[in-house]
Amino acid sequence: MSCVFLCSRFAPQTERGLWQPRELLEQRALRLALGMGVLLCVPSLSGCCLLNLYLKSAELKYPLPPEQAVQVDRDRTYKEVDGKRLLFDLYRPADAGEPLPVVIMIHGNGPQWMLDEAKDWGNFTGFGRAIAGRGHAAIAFNHRGSSDLSGLPEEASDVEAMVAYVRAHAVELGVDPERICLFSFSGGGAYVGWALRDRPAYLRGLVAYYSVLDLESVEGMRSDSVSAEDWRAYSASSHLQPGGAPAPRMLVARAGQDREDINRSIDVFVERARAAQLPIELLEHPEGRHGFDVLDEHPRTREIIARTLEFIDEVFARVEEPAQAASQSASTQASQ
């Protein structure tokens, strides 16, 4: 699964004339990295280094606050597994005083050698700065990975552990444990099902960019080590029933040029959320690719990022009654 996501996310599209000179160099580096092992999920030292270099150098296609306006506390440990530290970075406004609401960003799946530096990729560093620039806190972190989601339960447990750590250490981190928003990217959508199942009151919002939100839509990628029952249980779309505790407000961004099965998973998720009258907003990027936030210099990219930051402001600003949230969601859908 991870390798296919990588290819769809970073496949060069020279025939569309989207590459500028710098991007052409990045494209060649990426092709070299892919040729040295990424396509086969072989942890070639050169391929690994080049791919991570590319991912780190990718820039969010949105104006960012000056670096001195953001304070970054790097390489903190939230969990240890088999003697290995799982790390996170905390982004806060440089002049922050009171406890801040916090966005926890969740990267996708992949072989472990590729994910050890995921929190340093450009979309996470970019959004970390952008969110801190709005007066909130943000966390980018590394979780365990596997090449085919064979470690789905363990990987999802890392995400839950990150959230639990933030809440348990809120005073130390300077964050508000009762105002949290989850932000998944790509395969990271496989790790948010528990949040929609439990619907904790502290979860104010859920953002998903080009995320796998219905695992059964990508059924052919299920590892034999993960049962069909677990596959459904971890799928975010399985927990969109009406009733129960209020669901968090949700914002989903869909890239029109993404893989068909990824978009199918998003369509299923959105359809089920709307059928259950849950508060969801869909942002379409017809020309966007998987990873459009760092790949596509396009007006629609900036519009989606701007709306995402506004959405985060909104969910942290107040607690809405479910009926009010659903009404707002319906109005938003009707206007698109």
Image: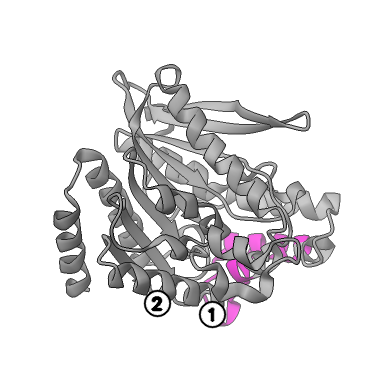
The answer to whether one can see residue 301 in this image is: yes
Q: Residue at x 53, y 72 (%)?
A: 262
Towards the viewer: 94 or 174? 174
Within 10 Å of disc 1 (Cα), the crowding (few <14, some 14-19, many 20+) is: few
Instruction: Please tell me whether mark 1 or mark 2 is closer to you in this view.
Output: 1
Mark 1 residue type: Glu
Q: Would you say residue 28 sits in the magenta stretch?
A: yes
Q: Which residue is located at x 68 percent, y 64 percent?
A: 227
Q: Magenta stretch: give its range.
A: 8-33
- In which image quadrant can residue 119 be found? top right
Q: Position of residue 45 (x, y in %)?
A: 84, 49
Q: The C terminus is located in which quarter?
A: bottom left
Q: Position of residue 63 (x, y in %)?
A: 36, 48
C-alpha span from label 1 to label 2: 13 Å
Quadrant housing the N terminus: bottom right
In this view of the protein, can residue 62 be seen by the observer? no
User: Residue 286, labelled with which disc?
Assistant: 2
Question: Dot 1 corresponds to which residue?
Answer: 260
Amino acid tagged 2: Pro
Q: How many marks?
A: 2
